[in-house]
Amino acid sequence: MQSLITDIHAHHAPAGLSRASDPAKVLVATRYPPFEARLELMDKAGVGRQILSCTAPTYLDDPLEARAKVQTINDELSARCAENPTRFGFWASLPLPHVEESLREIERIWNRPGAVGVYMGCSCQGGSIARAAFDPIYADLECRRGTVFIHPVQNGLNAPLINEFGLTVCAGAAIEDSVAALHLIGRRIPQRFPSIHFIIPHLGGLLPMLLNRLDGQMPRDPDSEPPSVLAKRFFYDTVGWGSKAAMIAAVEAFGDSQIVPGSDYPFLLSWESYTQSFQNVRDAGLSGESVRKILFENADRLLRCC
């Protein structure tokens, strides 16, 4: 039987949401193709399954409005998965920063068709996703042995030195990834909640180059494991715009068992074909064993834990 790829980083915009009203979406030039179009591209690329997520999290002040929005997202994604359960799964959005509403939504959606874990932004309303107030969410996910897919909110960390220079998406996204991972490490989330699997996108952003320095300089509690050890507990997806340097650095830093395939569908289609997004792994000069693990084994091993 031919091995197939599981694409853990693929987006879908539910029809019930207005993308035009969301500033984060205005930054995205690529329009979504019809949903059905992705199946042909998946077949050509050797992708057996996409794990769907909304494009970028948008967090609302009103808890009832926030939960209603994520229910719209999650119900449509679940319905898409129910129509074709062998080809699609989804990451469930949460109505952050509202903890009780998030816990109720996790309970509501956990066993719905296609649900494989939850989706969290790299930050939430300008605050860290590693904040102590969110510990009840992580405690709940720890009991469920849940998986958390992290994704930029495309705010450039609200930093003028990023956003005023037009770097919000092209560089800011990788910086968001890095800071979110560092916050999780800094609060020992992977150590305190070891049954949760976190996926950091875009090959970990800046993190592969920082591990030695973090071990030497990052403040940490006396009972904390070194940052490099905690970082190697995360998974990282292969969305890297074809950068061999980024791919090799991530594999060297985290190990080939922690890298999972992702495409960021459909947002790289104006840059590279869907097939090329995965060919990049083969073209990076990695060993055949590493390519096999990254493309065909790691994601399935991860999702079996969900």
Image (cartoon, rainbow, N blue to C red):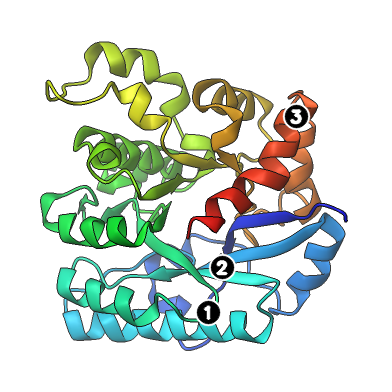
Name which residue type carries label 2. Leu
Name which residue type carries label 3. Glu
Q: Nearer the viewer, residue 179 or 222?
A: 222
Q: CA distance from mark 3 to mark 2?
A: 27 Å
- The answer to the question of whether label 1 and label 2 lie on touching residues, with beta carbons closer than 8 A, is yes
Q: Is residue 197 above or below residue 281?
A: below
Classify 10 Å Cα crowding around label 3: few (below 14), some (14-19), many (20 and above).
few
Which residue shows up at 62% across the image and 53% down it?
A: 300
Circle 1: element type: helix
Q: Position of residue 165 (x, y in %)?
A: 39, 40
- Looking at the image, residue 248 sits to the left or right of residue 150; the answer is right
Q: Nearer the viewer, residue 6 or 125?
A: 6
Quadrant location of the N terminus in the rendered image: bottom right
Q: Mark 2 highlights which residue?
A: 52
Q: Quadrant of residue 219?
A: top left
Q: Position of residue 60 (x, y in %)?
A: 23, 73
Lower sequence index among marks 1 and 3: 1
Q: Mark 3 highlights which residue?
A: 289
Q: Mark 1 highlights which residue?
A: 77
Which residue shows up at 47% across the image and 48% down it?
A: 169
Lower sequence index among marks 1 and 2: 2
Mark 1 or mark 3, whichever is nearer to me: 3
- Looking at the image, residue 267 sits to the left or right of residue 108; the answer is right
